[in-house]
Image: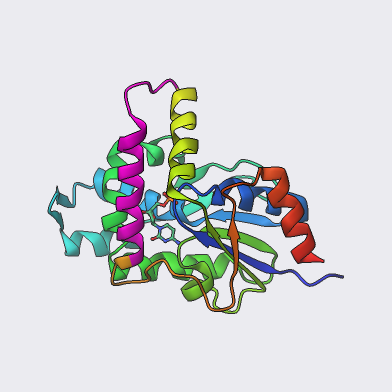
Amino acid sequence: MRKKMIIAVDGYSSTGKSTFARRIASMLGYLYIDTGAMYRAVALACLRRGIIKSSDPFRMDMDGLQDVLGKCDISFSNNSGAEHADTFLNGENVERQIRSVEVSDVVSNVSSIPQVRAFVDERLREFGKGRGIVMDGRDIGTVVFPDADIKIFMTAAPEVRAGRRLKEMREKGNDSVTYDEILENLEKRDRTDVSRAVSPLRKAYDAIVLDNSEMTLDDQMEWIKSILK
Ligand code: DC
């Protein structure tokens, strides 16, 4: 039987990592793990417990954090080979809540706390034991699974990413946000991701770069099939 691989998909935000990673998992019948969703679930648990004292500047009650992490059980539903999976926090489906503006506003700061990263990393390594998985995130190929079988680093021109994000927002009925605002927000997030002290976003030395600025999802699937061969 073919070896069950660990496939790490890292890269900049809005490069289509999760859609691509999900598709690969579905094609191979592997488990797909959205690692950003885990950080979002932790951020939601912190918000609910009221331990985030201020979002700008960011302040957290660190004793409260230990307590929250001790009671945080995060899981995913039917994600083996599925194109979609919901995130559960202590048995409750929180898929919609973790995508809210409130969570998006604090998740980057929450994910920069070393204790939070240690908590998530430990769970991610558990998920990876003895089975085929595709994980997308920022530090999967560098920190979580430095021995992953295949490492992909996704990038695309900021203008292309902003254009895709704008289209997505318009489709969801959001007409107020402008292209320039999206581009600015995206470039700011890029800077935060690359410059943070703990597990910054960077390409693993052995990762293969996929610049999908001018590629469709089908093109990307053809690309990964040739890599898998
Ligand atoms: O991919 P996303 O937007 O859902 O990620 C949410 C946040 O979590 C984002 O601020 C980056 C952070 N993150 C991280 O630090 N490491 C990962 N492996 C995945 C996400």
Horizontal side, residue 214 vs residue 65: left or right: right
Horizontal side, residue 157 vs residue 106: left or right: right
Q: Main secondary structure of the magenta part?
A: helix
The answer to whether one can see residue 103 in this image is yes
Q: Quadrant of residue 209?
A: bottom right
Task: Write down the region rendered in magenta.
Answer: 173-194
Q: Position of residue 69 (x, y in %)?
A: 33, 61
Above or below residue 187? Residue 61 is: below
Above or below residue 174? Residue 148 is: below
- Depth check: give the residue in front, 113 or 48: 113
Name the residue located 60 percent from the left edge and 45 percent from the top edge: 19
Quarter of the rendered structure image containing ligand 1: bottom left
Q: Quadrant of residue 109?
A: bottom left
The answer to whether one can see residue 71 in this image is no
Q: Position of residue 183 (x, y in %)?
A: 35, 42
Decide whether residue 104 is among the magenta residues.
Answer: no
Above or below residue 100? Residue 192 is: below
Q: Quadrant of the N terminus?
A: bottom right
Above or below residue 121? Residue 161 is: above
- Depth check: give the residue in front, 73 or 3: 3
Name the residue located 64 percent from the left edge and 47 percent from the top edge: 215
Name the residue located 38 percent from the left edge and 56 percent from the top edge: 72
Q: Quadrant of the C terminus?
A: bottom right
Name the residue located 38 percent from the left edge and 49 percent from the top edge: 40
